[in-house]
Structure formats: C-alpha cells, structure tokens
Amino acid sequence: RFSIFLLSINRLYSVQITDQSFLSYQADNRQLRTVPITATRGTIRDRNQELIAISLPVNTIWANPKIIDTSNEDMIRLANLIDIEFDSLLSRIESNANREFIYLKRHLSPEHAAQILQLQIPGIYSMREYKRYYPAGENLAHLIGFTDIDEHGQEGLELSFEHWLGSAPGRKQVLRDRLGRVIEDIKLVEEPTYGRDLITSIDMRIQYIAYQELKNAVTLNNAKSGSIIVINSESGEILAMASQPFFNPNNRQTFNAENYRNRTISDVYEPGSAIKPFIVAAALESGLYDEMSLIDTSPGNLYVSGRKLTEDSIDHGLMSLSNILERSSNVGAGLLSLSLDPEFTYNILSSFGFGRSISLGLPGESRGTLRLPDSWQQIDQATISYGYGLNTNLIQLGQAYQVIANDGLYVPLTILSQNVDTSLQNQVIHSENAIKIQTMLENVVIFGTGSNAQVENYRVGGKTGTAWKFSNGSYDENLYVASFAGIAPISNPKFVVIVVIDEPNNGQYYGGAVAAPVFSNVMKEVLRIYDIPPDSFHEDVFTNELIANRNISPLGINENAF
C-alpha cells in the first residue's frame, strides 16, 4: 500500500510540476482554433454539359492581429508581396488589434501565397477559397451574370439561382502550430453545404455563333446596341441569348452597369411591323376572315376621325392577309384591326404573351405594356396593328413567334434544360390558323421585305420590323429599332430566331436590311448543327412556280412600316 501511495504522489508531482513546462510549451506552440470548411459553389453547364461557370481554387492570406509582432522585419516584405503600403498594412493590423481574423489579400495563386508563407511570420496564415471563372467569357456574360468576391450571385443566373448554386462553409476544430499550420483535426463542428449544379438549355455551339453574328452586325451598322435569341419552338428551350455591348465577367475592371444589362429581357421597344402576324391571327380567329379574304386599301392611306395616321408607299388596292404581311402594309393592318372587336384583339395579343412577364426567373425582366382595351380609342386600335402604342421586349416577341411556329401551342420559354411541362401549355390559336400564318411568313421571305433572311435549301419564314423611337416626348424620325423574327424550317418548324438592332446608324435602318441577314447567318448554322435535312425542292424552281401561280403586282413594299 505504501508503494502505491508513493506512486500516486510521484504521478501528482509529475503532472503538477514536471509536465507543467511541457503543457505550457504545448500551449505556446499549439493553438486550438475553429476554422471554416470551404464548400464549393455549384457549376453552371450548357445542355451538353459544357462548363460555363466554375469555381476554381485560390488562396487567401489572412492575419490574426492579436499575435502579430509588427516590429518583425519581414513585415516590409509582406507589404510588398500583397501590394500594399507598409504604413497602411501596420494601420490595418493595429486598428484591428482586438480581432483574431482579418483579410490581407484574397484570391492569390498558390505560388504567390507560398511566397508569403515562406516568410514564416507568426499570425499570418493562408486559407483555401474559390474564385468564379467563366470559360465562355463575354459570349454568355449577360445571361450567366457574375458573383461578388464571396461568390454570392449579383446578376443573371448567378443571382436568380443563388438558392440552388450557393454554398455555405462548415466549421471544424483544429490544432495549429505557432506558424498556423494544422497539426491535427480535432472535431467537426458544422457540416458544409455544397452548391448544386445547374444545367441550362443553352447550346454553346449556337451561342458562339449567335453572339458573334450579333456583334458583327452592331459594329457594321454602327448601332447603339443589339440582342438576339434562339429558341427550340417545340420545347420552349432557349438555345442562345446574347446582347451588345458586351462585358467580360472574368475582368471586373471592365464592369459597367450599362454594359452588363441583359437587353433581351430588360429593354422594351415598340415592335413596328413585327406585330402584324398577330393582328392577322386575331382576324383569322375571329371567323370574319380567311386566307382568301381581301381588304381594300385604296387609296393607300389611313384616316381615323379625320386624322391621317399612316400611308403605304403605293396604292396596293385589294390585298389578301398574306399580301398585307408580304408588303408590310400599315393601311391594310390598320383596316384589319379596326374591323375587329378591341377586347378580342387584346385577348389574342395577351394570350401570345404581350404585356405580361414571360417569367424566365431572370433579374430585370420587364413586362412591356399592352393597355386594357377599354382605354383604346380608334387611333390606338389602328396604330397597335403596325406596332405602336404597345411595348415589348425581345423575349416576349420570341414567345409569341414560338406559338406560331408550334402550330398555335403556347409552350413557356425556359432557360433550363428540362422535360416539357405540359400542364403549362395552352392552345392559343387553332393549329390550322397558325399553319396559314407560317405560310404567309414564308411569302414575306420569298416575295416581300424579308428576302435577306433566306437560307439556301430551306424554307424559312419571318417578319421584318422597323420602328421610330420615342424620344423627348415625340417620335424621332432619325432613330430606329430594326428587327427580324423568323421561323425555320417552314416545312416542319423547329426553331425561332429573333434579332433586334437598336439605332443602326450606317445608312441602313430597315429590319430587312439590318436584322434579317443576322437571322439568315445564324439560322443556317442552327439547321446544320442540328442536322435538319434540307427541304426537297430546288429553290429557283420552287420560287418561279410560286410566282407563276400568283398574280404578283409590283411590291411597293412599305418596309418603312410604322
């Protein structure tokens, strides 16, 4: 028993006296700390799994001001390595003397961070963070948006899908030595939450082409801006979406709020003659007209309440509904609209998507304006038919043309790659009427204002639009918005492409001259990439046969169609 007592005394002495210096040494040289566990943000990919947004590992230098000795001679070298004035560095540390954590330099390369850690300054540490990188650069910038330095979404998909993409760090307790190196993981305090991947409907093969063709057109026409969208008309999936001017999301020094606005959803404009197919749709749906109906447009101008509203470039006389679209007759469209019930016309336009949000879920989407019919005067009823008195954005126009291309069936547009939700589909107009309009739009390309939209060996259809811009309380006859909305192939519609060029200023300003060529170049590549077989006709023979079987008078195209 006595020996056991001696052993107990000896152990007590060892713990209280002998081990005291060792434990003190351990306390000096080891620090128990709770540190974050970094979690990565979800990636964004195109429909083919190509990466379009990814978080790359970087190093961040941080400091514990409580234990930093600012007299350390290596502090000057530290200041140089993190590119800060020495006095400023000391001031930051001293002003945060009661804190245990401050950032010194974020998002450094591993090599750069290693140089700093080699100084072995007590209280200076490195931690792993992530920096967002966009492989497509400017090509997809307006849709994807960007994050801040903490990887929180600020614009575009990064913002609207923050709840899906975002991550949250976990926490764990670790033992560090005096140089900040982790010696041992002690325990997990909180699990990290990792972001989820987002698969978009975008096809980067199409996106690159659409972006470049738009950029070229804006430059060629010395335009203020431009936008384009490519849609799968059967599924409603958006295959490409681009705007000009551009910005590079990988270079924050170039950021400009004006440039990173997604104009396809934010900018509204009066669509001009691009609205006319939907007035024709209302006429067909009313039961008052069919494709053989004739409208007498003589003497080539339109008066309402004794006021001259518009005129055609020549007196077209009797015009079919197709003629009105081919020659972009304001008089014909106006007379057609005036013969319809305003509420009926309003309901048709609204059902196509005008005046209401398309709800892509992207920040900054505008609703456009389509006033309620009880506020319409006869003048409004007429001018709406050729694209004045209502505002739309490119995405709304794309949705409307999707309905025509899809035989009258409304399928909500989406930016995500997903199965079609049939519960949200709606038959807006009878399929036979939609098919009639498709043929009329083809005639616009063959016989009318859309000849520059032709795609070799394919049947395409579309409508030009040219509108004055409203500025300083009146319409400015020197400022235009030029557009083209098209469908292909007409034999079995698959795709819609909408192009808008804002304020072209290089001699040409008509939609057929400025926007239609962009449509042609993009649609040609879309059809090639998706391996759509050419239509089985020889283009010259087909066109000649059509002309021979029609009584085609001189065009007298009213492409100045307001």
Image: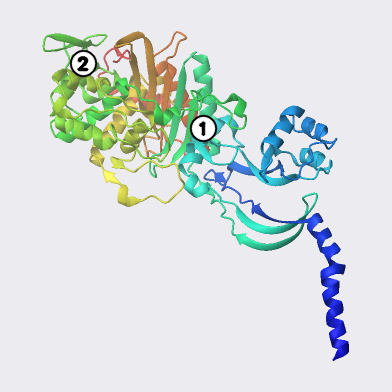
Q: Secondary structure at mark 2?
A: helix
Question: Viewed as shown, does residue 550 lie left or right of 187?
Answer: left
Q: Amino acid at mark 2?
A: Val
> To which residue does mark 1 refer?
525
Taking 95 as reference, is 259 above or below it? Answer: above
Farthest bottom residue in view: 1
Res. 85 visible in picture: no
For residue 162, the mark is none
Quarter of the figure with residue 509:
top left
Picture mark count: 2
Q: Local crowd at mark 2 within 10 Å, few (<14), some, or many (≥20)?
A: many
Quadrant of the snapshot with the C terminus = top left
Say whether disc 1 or disc 2 marks the residue closer to the N-terminus. Answer: 2
| Numbered tag placed on residue 331 in the rendering | 2
Q: Residue 224: x percent and y percent?
A: 46, 16
Q: In which quadrant of the rendered view does residue 386 lie?
A: top left
**Residue closest to the eye, 110 or 400:** 110
Q: Residues within 10 Å of mark 1 (few under 14, many from 20)?
A: some
Q: Nearer the viewer, residue 219 or 330?
A: 219
Q: Which residue is located at x 26 percent, y 30 percent?
A: 278
Q: Is residue 375 visible?
A: yes
What is the quadrant of the N terminus in the image?
Answer: bottom right
Could you say which is closer to the camera, residue 379 or residue 146? Answer: 146
Horizontal arrangement in the rendering, residue 88 relative to residue 438 (left or right): right
Q: Amino acid at mark 1?
A: Glu
**Residue closest to the far left:** 305
Secondary structure of residue under mark 1: helix
- Taking the spot 58% from the left edge, 44% from the top edge, the residue there is 50
Estimate the x, y position of residue 95 in percent, counting from the top left: 67, 35
C-beta proximity under 8 Å, tags 1 and 2: no
